[in-house]
Image (cartoon, rainbow, N blue to C red):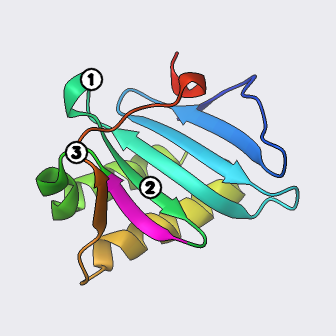
C-alpha cells in the first residue's frame, strides 16, 4: 500500500489514506499517533465493502452484510500481505484490529447495505 498525500485533517485528528489494487485504508490518528478510527475498504464499485472501527463504538461493516460478515481468512491474509508496506505504527495497530475482527464470535453490526465514500475519500 502506498500513502495518498494531501488529505485534509480534522480538528482533533490527522487523516491518512493508503491505497493498493484491492484496498483503500483510511485512518484517523491523534497527534501522538494513536489510532482512533479506520475504514478498510475493499471490493469494487457497487460491491464495495468496508470494515469500520471506531475507538468508542467498536466494529461495523458497510456494504454487503453476508460477504462482510463471513470475514474469512482471504480478507485477513490479503490484508496481512498488503499491510507490509504500511508505516510500522499503523501496520501494528491495523493488523491487531483486523485479526480481532476475524476472531470475533459475536456478530458485527451492519450500518448500511451499501458503502458510501465521503467526498474527501474519492480519487
Above or below residue 82? Residue 100 is: below
Residue under the image location 79 percent in, 50 percent down: 13
Residue 72 seen by the camera: no
Q: Please, what secondary structure does the residue beneath circle 1 have?
A: helix
Task: Provide the secondary structure element on which disc 2 rests.
Answer: strand
- Reading the image, the residue beneath label 2 is 52
Question: Front-most of 70 and 107?
Answer: 107
Which residue, given by chain and number where applicable, does mark 1 sit on?
45
Q: Cα distance, mark 3 to mark 1? A: 13 Å
The quarter of the displayed image where residue 52 is located: bottom left
Residue at the spot 62% in from the left edge and 48% down from the top edge: 27
> Which residue sits at x=30%, y=70%?
102
Q: Which residues are magenta?
A: 57-61
Task: Judge whether residue 53 is colored magenta.
Answer: no
Tell me residue 6's x, y (percent). 75, 22
Q: How far from the left and from the top, in percent, is residue 67?
A: 15, 52
Q: Which residue in the structure is indicated by mark 3?
A: 113
Q: For residue 8, which numbered disc appears in the image?
A: none
> Which of the marked residues, 2 or 1, is nearer the chain's N terminus?
1
SS category of the residue bearing label 3: loop
Amino acid at each position: 500500500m502506498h500513502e495518498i498525500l494531501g488529505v485534509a485533517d480534522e480538528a482533533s485528528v490527522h487523516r491518512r489514506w493508503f491505497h493498493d489494487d484491492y484496498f483503500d485504508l483510511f485512518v484517523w490518528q491523534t497527534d501522538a499517533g494513536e489510532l482512533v478510527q479506520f475504514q478498510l475498504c475493499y471490493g469494487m464499485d457497487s460491491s464495495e465493502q468496508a470494515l469500520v472501527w471506531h475507538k468508542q463504538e467498536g466494529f461495523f461493516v458497510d456494504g454487503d452484510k453476508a460477504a462482510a460478515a463471513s470475514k474469512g481468512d482471504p480478507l485477513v491474509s490479503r490484508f496481512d500481505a498488503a499491510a507490509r508496506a504500511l508505516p510500522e505504527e499503523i501496520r501494528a495497530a491495523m493488523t491487531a484490529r483486523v485479526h480481532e475482527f476475524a476472531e470475533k464470535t459475536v456478530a458485527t453490526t451492519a450500518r448500511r447495505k451499501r458503502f458510501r465514500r465521503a467526498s474527501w475519500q474519492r480519487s
